[in-house]
Image (cartoon, rainbow, N blue to C red):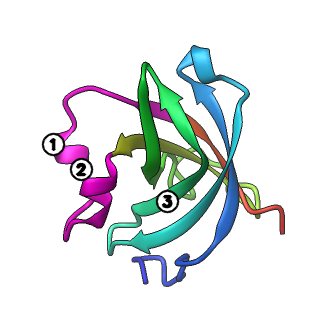
Amino acid sequence: MNRTGVNSRGMAADLTVADPWELAGMRFGVEVVQEDSEGRMLARVEPALDWKGTQYHFLVLERRHRAGSTGQPPAPHSMECAGIGVSTEQAAGTSPWGADRWRGGLALLGTLSTGA
């Protein structure tokens, strides 16, 4: 359970990419497989996301704007997020979050929507 008190594990959602521009507008199905106490989510991507010759089956997603940070509450079933691609090996590790170790590869901005 994350610091908001919401358990997102197992949640299925759609991720619509806004940036990088080469992927802008593309939609991917994701399933949250793990989350940490800081609100970051490890999500499995279906179909795998191909970025510059590398297949990403997992993303670490984090809310981009916290409620109240822009003066407006987020939409009820969507959130803007930032994400980085992580390898299958990183995803299977004890600490898959990777943002502190990111040195290139896939980084994206998008909107996560549950459709509920």
Image quarter in which the N terminus is found: bottom left
Image x and y of residue 20, in percent: 53, 20
Q: Is residue 42 left or right of residue 73?
A: left
Task: Kindly state the secondary structure of the residue where label 3 is placed.
Answer: strand
List the residue tagged with mark 2: 98
Give residue 43's mark: 3
Left-right relation of 99 to 23: left
Residue located at (52% from left, 78% from top):
9
For disc 1, the neighbor class at 10 Å (few under 14, some 14 to 19, many from 20) is: few
Q: Position of residue 71 (x, y in %)?
A: 62, 48
Cα separation, mark 1 vs mark 3, equals 18 Å
Q: Alpha-carbon neighbours of circle 2 within 10 Å: few (<14), some, or many (≥20)?
A: some
Q: Earlier in the sequence, mark 2 or mark 3?
A: 3
x, y percent for residue 43 = 49, 59
Which amino acid does the dot numbered 3 rest on? Ala
Q: Which residue shows up at 59% across the image and 15% down it?
A: 22
- Dot 3: few (<14), some (14–19), or many (≥20) neighbours within 10 Å? many
Residue 97 in view in this figure: no
Tell me how far mark 1 sits from mark 2, CA to CA.
Answer: 5 Å
The quarter holding residue 68 reads bottom right
Q: Amino acid at mark 1?
A: Arg
Magenta stretch: give its range: 87-108
Disc 2 residue type (three-letter): Gly
